[in-house]
């Protein structure tokens, strides 16, 4: 790696996690939530997303490449840390560990999830609709893994939003950082609710 | 006569930088208000382990004995702090003493904190006032700002923040919280600000500011209560502005 790229790479990693990857997750979960309103509503929403203009461009440049960079650089970040919560069990140190842990869990989950949805649709002529998801989560094991994956992703985004605000110098004072902890944890709870009720609608 | 109360110390020792660490236990006669330094002095006076074996005296570093120099930093019951201000009455027994783990061990409880002093040189943690002629008096600093800066200036390079930081380790080049906070201190000084751009460029380079992962352990362990995480966040803001200026902006130095 060229010298003095670290600052740029770190900031890019932080930015991409929120825009576009975080925004994408929000849209994705919102679309999924349509499943709670029935098969028809979900299929309509999925069809709308699948037929967006420039969908391939969006998939490559707004989802795939940013996600790939965020994932690869994230693994590097996660494995340069020496976690020490056993010795320093403070709240933020736990969040530091959980951020890295949920990042790895989310990455494994996303690879698996993309394999049994997007890859199947693009290369094996499967159709993305309610039945596809219903088939994937028709047993308690995959359903549980999906719930773990969704909650991990949402936690990683919410807490990532907190550290984004610190890393870019938005929240400097301890008070603002405390308030943002509450705000981002509220986001975590709300988005988890949306994500989990959506996946349960398929089961 | 009642038996004298003894305090058990379990000390992690190491004979030289390359040898294996080992543990030795010592019993020190209790005195009220005994601190860890005084206990170590007791061991030096009579280097006999708890099971009666003669051994070499345990070595450690010390200087001010009032928690302003940072030399006697060690892990006391697993927490990085200064031995001089660690009062035995306030500690759980047996008392475990270990050298800081982030720094190379010289011998026993003595570690080499050179990397911290190198970091201070790297970020130019000083006020440049030397010239080939009299530069005259510098600009004045408002009293409230001086008081604020005084808190940051309490840093004694003791190493507790680097010890607790999960991102300061042999896998990363992270400069650590102490030197970063000093950048904020010297950039805030009216004369120190003359080197602001250089300091920002240094900490925006490899191993710099961006390595902070916000575990915020540093601010918890700092014995001087320095707002290290506030310093880092403030520098993050300054670095954001600086990077936008570098890219979009101005050729102003």
Image: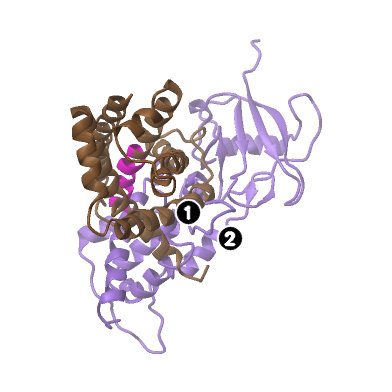
Residue A12 at x, y percent in the picture:
36, 60
Q: Is residue A195 left or right of residue B82?
A: left
Residue at image position (28%, 83%) is B251
Q: Is residue A14 left or right of residue B72?
A: left
- Please, which residue is most extreme toward the front here? A125
Rendered brown, the chain in question is A
Residue at image position (29%, 64%) is B240
The mark lying in front, picked from 1 and 2, is 1
Q: Which mark is residue A13?
A: none
Asked if one can make out residue A106 in the rendered structure from this viewpoint, the answer is: yes
Element class at badge 2: helix
Q: Which residues are magenta?
A: A154-166
Mark 2 packing: few (<14 Cα in 10 Å), some, or many (20+)? few
The figure's colour scheme reads by chain
Residue B73 at x, y percent in the picture:
54, 45
Snapshot quadrant of residue B26: top right
Element class at badge 1: helix
Callouts 1 and 2 on one subunit: no
Mark 1 packing: few (<14 Cα in 10 Å), some, or many (20+)? few
To which residue does mark 2 refer? B114
To which residue does mark 1 refer? A72
**Mark 1–mark 2 distance (CA, rounded to whole Å):** 33 Å
Q: Is residue B63 left or right of residue A9?
A: right
Residue A23, compared with residue B88, is above or below; it is below
Is B101 inside the magenta-drawn segment?
no
**Which of the pair A152/A176 is nearer the observer?**
A152
**Which of the pair B9/A23 is nearer the observer?**
A23
Is A159 inside the magenta-drawn segment?
yes
- In the rendered image of the structure, the colour used to display chain B is purple
């Amino acid at each position: 790696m060229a010298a003095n790229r670290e600052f740029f790479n770190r900031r890019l990693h932080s930015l991409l996690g929120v825009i576009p990857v975080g925004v994408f997750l929000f849209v994705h979960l919102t679309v999924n939530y349509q499943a709670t309103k029935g098969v028809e509503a979900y299929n309509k929403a999925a069809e709308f997303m699948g037929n967006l203009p420039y969908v391939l461009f969006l998939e490559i440049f707004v989802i795939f490449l940013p996600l790939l960079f965020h994932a690869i650089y994230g693994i590097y970040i996660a494995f340069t840390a020496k976690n020490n919560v056993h010795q320093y069990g403070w709240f933020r140190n736990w969040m530091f560990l959980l951020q890295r842990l949920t990042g790895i869990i989310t990455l494994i989950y996303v690879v698996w999830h993309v394999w049994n949805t997007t890859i199947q649709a693009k290369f094996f002529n499967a159709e993305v609709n309610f039945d596809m998801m219903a088939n994937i989560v028709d047993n308690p094991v995959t359903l549980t893994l999906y719930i773990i994956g969704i909650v991990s992703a949402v936690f990683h985004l919410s807490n990532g939003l907190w550290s984004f605000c610190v890393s870019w110098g938005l929240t400097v004072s301890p008070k603002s950082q405390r308030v943002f902890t509450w705000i981002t944890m509220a986001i975590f709870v709300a988005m988890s609710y949306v994500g989990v009720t959506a996946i349960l609608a398929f089961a | 006569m009642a038996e004298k109360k003894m305090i058990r110390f379990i000390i992690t020792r190491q004979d030289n930088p390359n040898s294996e660490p080992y543990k030795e236990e010592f019993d020190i006669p209790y005195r009220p208000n005994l601190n860890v330094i005084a206990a170590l002095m007791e061991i030096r006076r009579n280097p006999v382990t708890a099971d009666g074996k003669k051994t070499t005296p345990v070595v450690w570093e010390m200087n001010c004995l009032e928690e302003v120099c940072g030399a006697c930093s060690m892990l006391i019951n697993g927490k990085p702090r200064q031995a001089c201000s660690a009062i035995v009455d306030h500690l759980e027994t047996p008392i475990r003493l270990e050298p800081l783990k982030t720094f190379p061990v010289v011998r026993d409880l003595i570690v080499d904190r050179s990397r911290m002093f190198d970091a201070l040189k790297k970020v130019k943690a000083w006020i440049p006032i030397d010239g080939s002629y009299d530069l005259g008096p510098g600009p004045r600093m408002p009293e409230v700002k001086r008081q604020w800066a005084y808190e940051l200036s309490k840093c004694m390079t003791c190493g507790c923040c680097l010890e607790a930081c999960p991102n300061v380790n042999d896998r990363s080049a992270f400069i650590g919280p102490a030197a970063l906070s000093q950048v904020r201190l010297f950039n805030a000084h009216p004369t120190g600000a003359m080197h602001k751009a250089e300091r920002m460029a240094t900490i925006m380079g490899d191993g710099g500011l961006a390595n902070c992962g916000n575990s915020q352990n540093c601010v918890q362990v700092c014995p001087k209560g320095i707002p290290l995480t506030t310093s880092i966040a403030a520098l993050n803001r300054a670095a954001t502005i600086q990077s936008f200026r570098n890219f979009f902006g101005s050729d102003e130095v």
